[in-house]
Image (cartoon, grey):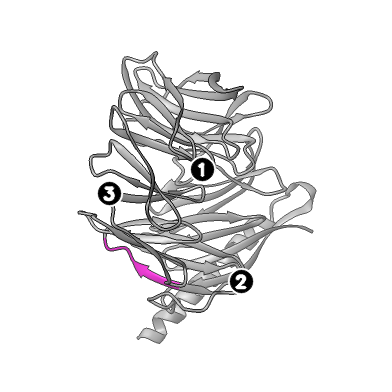
């Protein structure tokens, strides 16, 4: 039975790649581009614990339903393990924690312990940095390379949203304000959104260079605010009243090159172009993850939809649909690296490469 199940997983992965190849390559792409299947791997045969030897190629993390782990760009699954309660995850480390977290271990993809942190709270990793949110959700600490507190900051209100770059961490608060902290924990940005009947920050994004900060703010009316660093202060450079009335965390992110901001709107994905200061909408259902772009191609990638009706979409500005592939899976993830798309579908991981033919 186990062998039969493994075969079914392998076959399903091959079928998925075959469908993707047929649908994508049948479409005319600019500059004779093609999305090529490279490999498909099932998680059923993956080790349940980290391997002590590193994998060949770049290593990528994944969270697929109640499982997480790492895989290499060459197609080796390092391990796949269950998430007992909470997980902080990045490409170079992870930490598992429980509901009453009083401490945790941070480990590498090979399972080696980097350090133990005896700090109450919930760890989260972003932009190559490691943070711990206080149990009351009104304070944050950053950890140094030894697992000790580098600094701690206490907020006047509960934290509702977060975004970071290597040099700037921005926290959105329930009272509608934004607080930006530098690498030393110093307060370098304060902004109160205003303009809405009910305050609150529902999403925050920081550009990779730290010069732009964006937030989805307020209820009745809700708006997008983009701030730009000018000399030593952040000032509003663009804003838009939105048709949304989200009362939950909103997906929002800059692309890795910092040229675009992508954010969730009803029935689509809003896009703000940094250079032109123009905005437009990509027609798509709610996206799991935003801010993905294929390096060198100026193409945005998103996995839209929910439950079993998701679609892999590749689009060029302003809404030129280059690829639109149905993805039938109850659990998914998507990650990019250069011109490669890594797609998780239930118990499989597939790599697709964009190439110029």
User: Could you tell me how far apart the alpha carbons at marks 1 and 2 are, in whole angstroms?
Assistant: 25 Å
Q: Bounds of the magenta span? A: 79-84
In terms of image quadrants, where is residue 84? bottom left
Crowding around mark 3 (Cα neighbors within 10 Å: few <14, some 14 to 19, many 20+) is: many
Q: Which residue does the numbered mark 2 point to in the structure image?
A: 74
Q: Which residue does the numbered mark 3 point to in the structure image?
A: 121
Q: Does residue 251 appear in this view?
A: no
Coordinates of residue 319 in the picture (x, y in percent): 62, 35
How many callouts does the rendering have? 3
User: What label sits on residue 290 in the rendered view?
Assistant: 1
Q: Is residue 63 left or right of residue 320?
A: left
Q: Residue at x 59, y 31 (%)?
A: 211
Check contact, mark 1 vs mark 2: CB within 8 A.
no
Coordinates of residue 323 in the picture (x, y in percent): 62, 49
Label 1 element class: loop
User: Is residue 314 a member of the stretch shown in magenta?
Assistant: no
> Of 16 and 44, which appears nearest the observer?
44
Q: Residue at x 39, y 15 (%)?
A: 194
Quadrant containing the C terminus in the rendered view: bottom right
User: Could you tell me how far apart the alpha carbons at marks 3 and 1 are, in whole angstroms?
Assistant: 27 Å
Q: Residue at x 36, y 70 (%)?
A: 81
Q: Does residue 291 appear in this view?
A: yes
Label 2 element class: loop
Q: Is residue 72 left or right of residue 219?
A: right
Label 3 element class: loop
> Of 15 and 153, which appears nearest the observer?
153
Would you place residue 39 above or below residue 264 in this image? below
Would you place residue 28 above or below residue 198 in this image? below
In terms of image quadrants, where is residue 195? top left
Would you place residue 345 above or below residue 284 in this image? below
């Amino acid at each position: 039975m186990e062998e039969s199940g493994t075969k079914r997983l392998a076959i399903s992965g091959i079928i998925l790649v075959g469908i993707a190849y047929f649908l994508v390559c049948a479409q005319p792409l600019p500059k004779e581009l093609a999305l090529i299947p490279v490999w498909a791997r099932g998680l059923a045969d993956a080790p349940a614990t980290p391997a002590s030897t590193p994998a060949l190629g770049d290593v990528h993390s994944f969270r697929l339903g109640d499982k997480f782990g790492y895989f290499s760009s060459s197609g080796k699954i390092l391990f796949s393990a269950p998430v007992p309660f909470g997980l902080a995850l990045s490409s170079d480390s992870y930490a598992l924690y429980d509901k009453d977290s009083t401490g945790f271990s941070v480990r590498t993809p090979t399972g080696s312990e980097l350090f133990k942190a005896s700090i109450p709270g919930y760890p989260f990793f972003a932009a190559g940095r490691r943070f711990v949110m206080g149990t009351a959700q009104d304070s944050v600490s950053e950890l140094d390379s030894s697992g000790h507190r580098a600094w701690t900051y206490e907020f006047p209100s509960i934290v509702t949203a977060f975004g970071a770059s290597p040099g700037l961490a921005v926290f959105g608060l329930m009272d509608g304000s934004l607080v930006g902290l530098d690498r030393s924990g110093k307060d370098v940005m304060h902004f109160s959104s205003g303009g809405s009947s009910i305050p609150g920050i529902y999403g925050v994004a920081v550009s990779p260079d730290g010069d732009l900060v964006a937030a989805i703010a307020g209820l009745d009316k809700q708006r997008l605010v983009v701030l730009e660093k000018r000399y030593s202060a952040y000032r509003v450079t663009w804003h838009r009243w939105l048709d949304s009335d989200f009362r939950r965390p909103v997906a929002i992110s800059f692309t890795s090159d910092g040229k675009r901001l992508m954010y969730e709107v009803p029935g689509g994905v809003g896009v703000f172009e940094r250079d032109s200061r123009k905005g437009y909408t990509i027609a798509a259902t709610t996206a799991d993850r935003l801010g993905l772009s294929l390096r060198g191609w100026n193409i945005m990638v998103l996995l839209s939809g929910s439950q079993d009706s998701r679609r892999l979409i590749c689009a060029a500005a302003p809404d030129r649909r280059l690829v639109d592939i149905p993805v039938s899976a109850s659990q998914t993830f998507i990650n990019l690296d250069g011109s490669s798309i890594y797609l998780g579908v239930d118990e499989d991981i597939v790599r697709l490469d964009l190439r110029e033919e």
